[in-house]
Image (cartoon, helix red, strand yellow):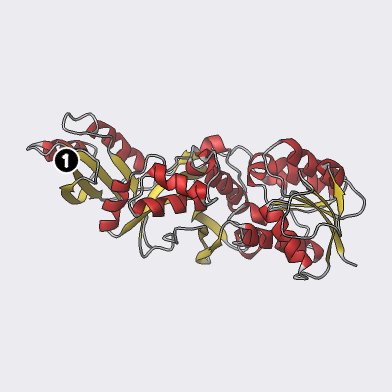
Amino acid sequence: MALRVNIAGLGTVGASLLQLLEGGQREGLAVSGISARSRSRDRGVDLSPYAWSDDPVSLAQADDAEVFVELIGGEDGVAKAAIETALRSGKHVVTANKALIAKHGLALAQLAEEMGVALRFEAAVAGGVPVVSGLRTGLSGSKILRLQGVLNGTCNFILAAMEGGASYADALAEAQRLGFAEADPSFDVGGIDAAQKLAILAAHAFGAMPPLTAIDPRGIDQVTPGDLSAARELGLRMKLVAAVSRTDDGLAARVAPALVPITSALDIGGGSENIVVVDAEPLGRVAFSGPGAGGGPTASAVLSDLTAISRGALGPAFGHPASSIDAAPKVAPDASPVPHFIRVLVEDRPGVLAGLTDILGRAEISIETIRQGPASQGEPGVELVLTTHASSTETHERAAAEIGKLEAVLAKPSVYPILSKD
């Protein structure tokens, strides 16, 4: 007998999911009912075979299905109410809602366990990349030490456009025109989207789910085309990198722009592709990569969860019992010593370099390379570009703040960690 499914939310992902199911790509699944804001909107798929509901919460508890799929979005409101109703009604739940899972995932997982049903959310992180199930099952026999990834396609697109010479404002406008960025892009470009995904992955990897306030994400809005151009000359490329690792007394977590060698696994393309690199014992290093957004890839991830449920995969949502997951772990900024890139716009006169190197020396930061050249178009003065030997980002940022106070410095210095290609 087919597993009956009700779907709330028929945007890009919901319509793509219906097309996959309508196309017979998965036997053993049958859509019973659907719900969305507008019944008349053309979604490129025939809705007539399915029962329509104007109320997602009512659909969530309808007796004509065993699984409720939430594709509405939003961390609270009707999406949360519908999921809670479905779980309390004994329905399995599949969602792509990363914001909701990052905020309420542990409570919902606890409810699912109490009701003896599944809560699954493969599509909430990295779209079509099977990293959630990989952590839940494939890596369950290894001790995960560190996880880092590129998890936001909007930032990928903007940084690639800026590397080609576009300003941040122009790159963002183009991303919005093409549908890669929302009208309010702050969740993406501010690093919040990546931080939500990182919190979900941390719960799987470490049995601890850091609150977003503890991660303190940094976005890409301060990155300049000049930074990217100077980095490219050094064989480096900018990415918004999300990273979390195990420490002696908790976790170290960071979401911020970082430079990666062009030979690094993290140097993925400038579109929607995502990658997650996991270091574990005794396995070593493994990477998950693929399309991280879009209707087809995300719907494919939803379909994989439905298939897993139809095959009886009803284990804990995060791979661990919800009661065993630390909801308030101690989280510190990642203090790992790594090389850094420093770019400073200065007046072209004697003595400037000496003042800069004096500050770095007092901070016990060792310079590896230094180059002076013309600033990028529209920027004042000349640029000094330095790379350093390994030290913490905090140490570099304190030194950069002091450098910024020098009379000859014309703009706030840029400081980015350089992540190893290994």
Instruction: Mark yes or no: residue 243 visible.
Output: no
- The residue lying furthest to the left in this view is 350
Image coords of residue 372 (percent x, y): 15, 48
Residue visible at 79% across and 42% down in the picture: 82
Instruction: Mark yes or no: residue 224 visible.
Output: yes
46, 302: nearer the viewer = 46
Residue visible at 31% across and 43% down in the picture: 415
Hey, which quadrant is residue 355 in on the image?
A: top left
Within 10 Å of the Cα at label 1, are there few (<14), some (14-19), or many (20+) other Cα atoms?
some
Task: State left or right for residue 95 relative to residue 227.
Answer: right
Q: Secondary structure at mark 1?
A: helix
32, 169: nearer the viewer = 169
Amino acid type, residue under disc 1 in the picture:
Thr
Image coords of residue 278 (percent x, y): 51, 59
Image coords of residue 279 (percent x, y): 49, 60
405, 58: nearer the viewer = 58
**Residue at mark 1:** 357
Residue visible at 35% across and 53% down in the picture: 163
Residue visible at 59% across and 53% down in the picture: 205
Image coords of residue 171 (percent x, y): 42, 47
35, 305: nearer the viewer = 35
- The residue lying furthest to the right in this view is 63
Task: State left or right for residue 322 relative to residue 345.
Answer: right
Classify the position of the N terminus by image quarter. Answer: bottom right
